[in-house]
Amino acid sequence: MALTFNHQTNDISNATGTVTFNGTAVGGDNTPPPRGDRGLFDIGRARGEWPNISVVNNIDYISIPTTGNASDFGDLTSATYDKAACSNGSRGVFGGGQNLASIDYVTIATTGNAQDFGDFTSTMRRSAACSNGVRGVFGGNSTTPSDIMEYITIATTGNGTDFGDLTVARYHLASCSSSSRGVFGGGWAGAYSNTIDYITIATASNAVDFGDLTVSRDQLASFSNGSRGVFGGGSGSTNTIDYITIASTGNATDFGDLVTGGVLLSGCSNDTRGVFGGGYYISGTNKLQYITIDTTGNATNFGNLAVTAEATQDGSACSGD
């Protein structure tokens, strides 16, 4: 059996699964990146009756295993929208936004306001982010579709670094990950995209084709349990949920339907349950809805975000403990 030692993450892995050292799993696609039971939602924009839209800096949180309404966590360093988020299980990172290159971070277990982390090399708006528990990768950019990807080391504050290029330039895409592989799906590339591409997060390089979503769309959300990745909502098919097996390239498969179809929504998960939050479609919503990731089927009502509005949209989400 061929083993690979990663000098950046100190992981030992093989191509097909987990390698253990003294009984502890230390690498491979079967070891999920750290996730936890607290989910954080950056609200983005709070929409009242048109044209009353407020750009806010609110962060809400939920306990993913327990249905109910979200509570206030704290504030981002600035009011903005179109951010992307990822975590290493203890630190949550929110990056980019409307005309912003800034990156914020929070300690997920402790409510409070975000702090400055660093900056991307350029503005990152309408991107998506994924993590292997060590490195966070942000991909896609607007307003002209871009194939840019940048990465950070989540535990260490600092600026973003070039990672490589997506296979298709696009924005308003979504991303999820395993312990080694990051996957980007959908987006706007001059038209709705069904592209899924993937990267090996520990190795900076260009993305590779993975397969296709069941429906071409943008403004969708994604999360995973480390082995199964789920994509939900989006313009072009607002209530669609589909899934992939992250370790195996191929096309997505139908999972079920959202309770309330939406665009511009966000999502987070623990190892069992995934939660979609916010979004906007016709009347808008601040609803939370959830699925059991390993079991296909329709979503179920979870509760509401803490921000009182007709809709909350253009936010981002991550999870940890």
Image (cartoon, rainbow, N blue to C red):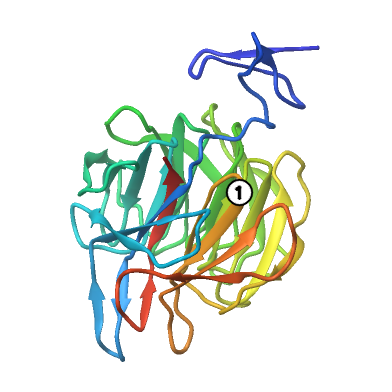
Relative to the observer, which residue lies in front, 74 or 10?
Answer: 74
Q: Residue at x 18, y 57 (%)?
A: 78
Q: Please identify the residue farthest to the right as the structure is shown.
A: 1
Q: Residue at x 69, y 43 (%)?
A: 246
Q: Position of residue 225 (x, y in %)?
A: 62, 45
Lateral position of residue 310 relative to residue 19, left or right: left
110 to 56, vertically: above or below? above
How crowded pointer 1 is (Cα within 10 Å; few <14, some 14-19, many 20+) is rated as many
Q: Residue at x 39, y 36 (%)?
A: 90
Disc 1: which residue: 224
Q: Residue at x 60, y 65 (%)?
A: 232
Q: Is residue 101 shown to the viewer in this render?
A: yes
Lateral position of residue 60 relative to residue 234, left or right: left
Q: Position of residue 126 (x, y in %)?
A: 41, 60
Which image quadrant for residue 16? top right
Picture quarter with the N terminus: top right
Q: Position of residue 85 (x, y in %)?
A: 40, 49
48 to 89, vertically: above or below? below
Relative to the observer, which residue lies in front, 1 or 165?
Answer: 1
Picture quarter with the C terminus: top left
